Image (cartoon, grey):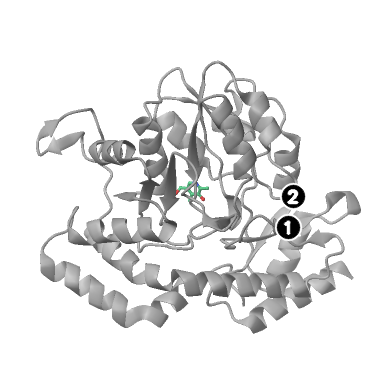
Amino acid sequence: MIPFFDLKKQYESIKAEIDGATRRVYASGWFILGPETEAFEQEFADYIGVKYGVGVNSGTDALHLAIRALGIGKGDEVITVPNTAVATVAAIEMAGATPVLCDVRADSMNMDADSFAAAITSKTRAVIPVHLFGQAAELDAIIGIARQYRLAVIEDCAQAHGATYQEQRVGSFGDIACFSFYPTKNLGAYGDGGAVVTNDARLAERVKLLRQYGWRARYESEISGVNTRLDELQAALLRVKLKYLPAWTQARRERASLYTELLPNKRVHPPSEMTYGAHVYHLYVVQCDESAGASRDYLALFLKEREIGTAIHYPTPIHSQPAYQARAPIGSLPVAEKLAREILSLPLYPELALADIRAVAAALREFES
Ligand SMILES: *Cc1c(COP(=O)(O)O)cnc(C)c1O
């Protein structure tokens, strides 16, 4: 049995430190916005290569507050992609703005700069490129267009902790960037968590106000805000895990390259690694060529029968989901729609045994023969 992921192995490998950090927070008697959160915010900002980090309760809230901090809301349009976690679009709506979706590229599966440019209207205020599956979007082209139209750039880095674009970490390119520490992400908490990072002191300050009722001083709201804070406990555990992130990223990359080396690559294709940066393989996503008769759904079933767990990220593009179908006419986004039918995520995490990768690759060879 090869599960799609297994978070217990990672805990076992760092149990003493995690348990120690847990006890330290319990004994401190301080649970909300204290020294652990402050330390983690700085350590994480340093890791990404930006000046400021602000911890919040989730990646969704990180996006929501980033949009609000930029002064974007009702009547404003924000462009993003349809093949992301629904959270990206939900956050735009939480801020009161209108999501507009553009298509993605067939190779990187990330935002297509031409499709983004075509979606810009007089109401567009920002673009959210998503670094999907752990690989940077084409930032040069996207940021170039955004600058030309004076649009804010909000990076959705929820799947790309440590991924690079031209040797610089994602999260340091846009005006502001958002991370999730959902347990299965490359840097995952033991519960919900997220962060906003930026080089802009004013934006960081604004996110800090927004995350706690708009308070600068306690009990006095300077602006109207919400409650979305990173717990001291989660921050303490994330500080432990951040130290291991480079090694875990390396382990993910090694496992991904072993898959790519072993897969037969006939009708089921390994992911394309773009030459402009380093992929951190949040997910290892293969593509079944339906025109060559490779059915993704059949492959998923074939692997399930061999006790190999898989998942689909994501089975239905956002514009085709019931909640969003009736929105403004987005029209067809053919590349995203085709990808949704063809992609399948294989098991990949730092602790995954190499023997398990060989077993999955052997099953793929059987499927392809
Ligand atoms: C996970 C994820 C989010 C949301 O993060 P949460 O912490 O679950 O709220 C946003 N965008 C993308 C691309 C994600 O993968």
Q: Which residue is mark 2?
A: 107
Give left or right: position of 1 versus 123. right
> In percent of the image, x 62 and y 48: which residue is there?
314
> In percent of the image, x 54 and y 58: which residue is there?
163
Callouts 2 and 1 close, C-beta under 8 Å:
yes
78, 19: nearer the viewer: 78
**In the image, residue 206 above or below residue 58:** above
What x and y, as percent, mark residue 326?
59, 23
The image quarter in which residue 134 lies: bottom right
What x and y, as percent, mark residue 221?
15, 30
Q: For mark 1, give the secondary structure.
A: loop
> In percent of the image, x 66 and y 55: which residue is there?
276
Q: For mark 2, give the secondary structure.
A: loop
250, 288: nearer the viewer: 250
Where is the N terminus found, in terms of image quarters?
bottom right
Instruction: Kindly identify the amino acid type of the residue bearing the numbered disc 1.
Output: Ser
Marking on residue 272: 1
Q: Residues within 10 Å of mark 1 (few under 14, many from 20)?
A: some
Which numbered disc flags the more N-terminal residue, 2 or 1? 2
Res 83 visible: no
Spatial CA distance of label 2 from label 1 is: 6 Å
What x and y, as percent, mark residue 126?
50, 29
What x and y, as percent, mark residue 174?
48, 41
**In the image, residue 299 above or below residue 148:** below
The image quarter in which residue 22 lies: bottom left
Give left or right: position of 368 versus 326. right
